[in-house]
Image (tube, coloured by chain):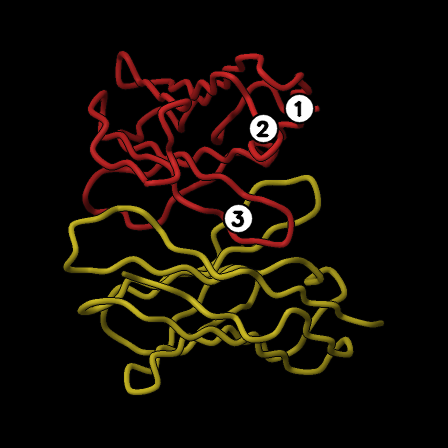
Chain colours: A red, B yellow
Amino acid sequence: DTGVSQDPRHKITKRGQNVTFRCDPISEHNRLYWYRQTLGQGPEFLTYFQNEAQLEKSRLLSDRFSAERPKGSFSTLEIQRTEQGDSAMYLCASSLGAASYEQYFGPGTRLTVT
Amino acid sequence: AQSVAQPEDQVNVAEGNPLTVKCTYSVSGNPYLFWYVQYPNRGLQFLLKYITGDNLVKGSYGFEAEFNKSQTSFHLKKPSALVSDSALYFCAVRGMDTGRRALTFGSGTRLQVQP
């Protein structure tokens, strides 16, 4: 059983650069979520996909953030013109259809903006 | 709006003793409630959930949680703590009637089990 995978696990970038993260959900899961977690805090919701449709976006998702799930399988999260405040752990989760309530999380991508 | 409060930053317990990690929530309508555990350098692992039905739900690794609607609480419990239970625990809520899928998490409680 392969769980949710994320790539890369760590990313260090300079302020102003663009970064892209990838998430591969559990294969039969049609729902995919992105969260952000900063030190000492719980995860905060960013956005949610059902298949390829982006159905929910948080106010945390500024114009510099964009997420896609083009074929309803893997997803990418891009941050343009990174700022030091973007430094965080970016978590991806997936869940199975309407009858499944719990979300299964990947290991996360730790972003450090210098 | 939905929110979760975990009033204790850290809980210390001796191995073999019972443990409780507290969680209270606020949500419109009925809640879906969850507990997750996070080990160092690993993602969140699902422990248990309350959707409907029996107020006492059992989950992984011997953990259980009790839903109390009148107190809007969902405390995590285990009868006998293990050193290996030491980790960061998060409570999360989603409103049943809101149509939203996003989970709202508490700030976490660090559980330290001493040998």
Find the distance from the CA under tag 2 to the CA under tag 3: 16 Å
Q: Residue at x 41, y 59 (%)?
A: B92
Q: Residues within 10 Å of mark 2 (few under 14, many from 20)?
A: many
Q: Which residue is mark 1?
A: A10
Tell me how many marks there are: 3
Q: Can the viewer see residue A68?
A: yes
Q: Residues within 10 Å of mark 1 (few under 14, many from 20)?
A: some
**What type is the residue that disc 1 sits on?**
His
* Position above or below: B114 against A83: below
Q: Which residue is mark 3?
A: B45
* Chain for numbered disc 1: A
Image x and y of residue B58, in percent: 43, 69
* Position above or below: B71 against A41: below
Left or right: where B27 falls relative to B88: left
Find the distance from the CA under tag 1 to the CA under tag 2: 5 Å
Image x and y of residue A114, in percent: 71, 24
Q: Which residue is mark 2?
A: A109
The answer to whether marks 2 and 3 mark residues whose Cβ atoms lie closer than 8 Å is no
Image x and y of residue B83, in percent: 76, 65
* Chain for numbered disc 2: A
Q: Residue at x 38, y 30 (%)?
A: A62
Dots 2 and 3 on the same chain: no
Q: Residue at x 39, y 78 (%)?
A: B73
Q: Nearer the viewer, residue B23 or A56?
A: A56
2 vs 3, front mark? 2
Looking at this rendering, what residue extends furthest in the bottom direction?
A: B70
**What type is the residue that disc 2 sits on?**
Thr
Q: Residues within 10 Å of mark 3 (few under 14, many from 20)?
A: some
Dots 3 and 1 on the same chain: no
The answer to whether marks 1 and 2 mark residues whose Cβ atoms lie closer than 8 Å is yes
Identify the image quadrant of residue B65: bottom left
